[in-house]
Amino acid sequence: MSTSMNFIDMALEVGERELASLLAGDIEEAERLAFDRGKLMEQAWQMRESDKVSQLRDKLMRLQSLQGQLSSEAKRLHETLKKDLKRAKQENERLSGYRSSTVKTPIASRFVDKVS
């Protein structure tokens, strides 16, 4: 098997781990794996051989499918984060409305009683 095919196989494996990280919510690990996958793809492209084009095309189609899954999962996570931030902002606005309606009562009066 050619070296470019090995790099593509490694990129597929890294991509599957990246998808698993995204599904688990480990964004930092997914980002690191995405960079690794990109480097492997660049190396595979530089070492490609013209006689293995059909095999290369099949593996690239698998990578394209994996990229689609990664993109859809990233979009889903983005939407979830967006909704969470919107909900937190609304909750903060709701709670800040109560701040103006509460009256601070001092523990002790500032006036001295002369009743003794």
Image (spheres, helix red, strand yellow):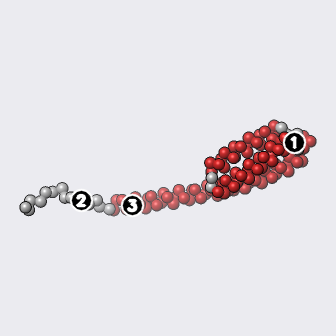
Marks 3/2: CA distance?
A: 24 Å
Which mark is first along the chain, 1 or 3? 1
> What's the mark number on residue 2?
1
Q: Residues within 10 Å of mark 2 (few under 14, many from 20)?
A: few
List the residue tagged with mark 2: 107
> Image point 66% across, 54% down: which residue?
22
In the displayed structure image, the side of residue 45 where residue 18 appears, left or right: left
Marks 2/1: CA distance?
A: 81 Å
Mark 3: amino acid: Gly
Give residue 12's position: percent from left, percent from top: 77, 49
Q: Determine contact: label 2, label 1, CB under 8 Å.
A: no
In the displayed structure image, the side of residue 57 where residue 27 appears, left or right: left
Q: Which residue is the extreme one toward the left? A: 116
Q: Quadrant of residue 110?
A: bottom left
> Image point 15% across, 57% down: which residue?
111
Give residue 49's position: percent from left, percent from top: 88, 39
Q: Residues within 10 Å of mark 1 (few under 14, many from 20)?
A: few
> Image point 69% across, 55% down: which residue?
20
User: Which of the image's four quarters has the N terminus?
Assistant: top right
Q: Residues within 10 Å of mark 3 (few under 14, many from 20)?
A: few
Q: Nearer the viewer, residue 114 or 74?
A: 114
Count of numbered circles in the view: 3
> What's the mark number on residue 97?
3
Which mark is first along the chain, 1 or 2? 1
Q: Quadrant of residue 48?
A: top right
Element type at mark 1: loop
Visible residue check, residue 67: no
